[in-house]
Amino acid sequence: MDLHDAPPAHPAVHGLAAVAVDCADPSLLAEFYARLFGLPWASDEDGDASVYGDVGPTIDFLQVPEGKAVKNRLHLDIRATDLDAAVEHALTLGATRAPDVYDGDSWVVLRDPEGNEFCLLRPYDGGELQWTPDSTRS
């Protein structure tokens, strides 16, 4: 993979605030991901819910009337410190395996309780490219 230099940031754009997930039951998914990550979550008066962390974007779960129909075009890649233990933890919380999406040993594809795919990745081994934000950007 070739890592390209970042173009200059526009001063009006600060960063990624949230990842929004359309779903049928926001509280169900917020609780699932909150328990997976060990983070707090809350729901609002409209029934939407969010998972909050100290680092990274908030994950917002928004209720929509239509159900999931095809493989997600966007999914979460979650780094594990122990892949086997992370998979077992996710399965205990209600995830299911998704071997129809990928059935190898580089990572594990699972589905959350509403069928949204997400990946659990092996611990970082230092071999893949990592992007670090420019320290001058605020």
Image: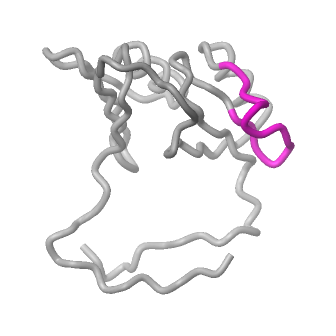
Q: Quadrant of the C terminus?
A: bottom left
| Residue drawn where x is 42% and y is 19% of the image | 67
Please tell me in which quadrant of the rendered image residue 45 appears. Answer: top left
Position in image of residue 24 (x %, y %): 37, 16
Kindly report the secondary structure that dominates the magenta region of the rendered protein.
Answer: loop
| Residue drawn where x is 60% and y is 14% of the image | 93
Position in image of residue 105 (x %, y %): 86, 43
- Magenta residues span 96-109
| Residue drawn where x is 37% and y is 79% of the image | 135
Task: Say if the magenta span includes residue 99.
Answer: yes
Position in image of residue 132 (x %, y %): 49, 73
Disc tally is: 0
Please tell me whether residue 97 is drawn above or below residue 122 in the rendered image. above
Q: Quadrant of the N terminus?
A: bottom right
Please tell me in which quadrant of the rendered image residue 77 appears. Answer: top right
Q: How is the image coloured?
A: one colour
Front one among 91 and 132: 91
Horizontal side of residue 22 vs 3, given as left or right: left
Front one among 80 and 47: 47
Please tell me whether residue 61 is drawn above or below residue 57 in the rendered image. above
Horizontal side of residue 51 vs 45, given as left or right: right
Task: Say if the magenta span includes residue 39.
Answer: no
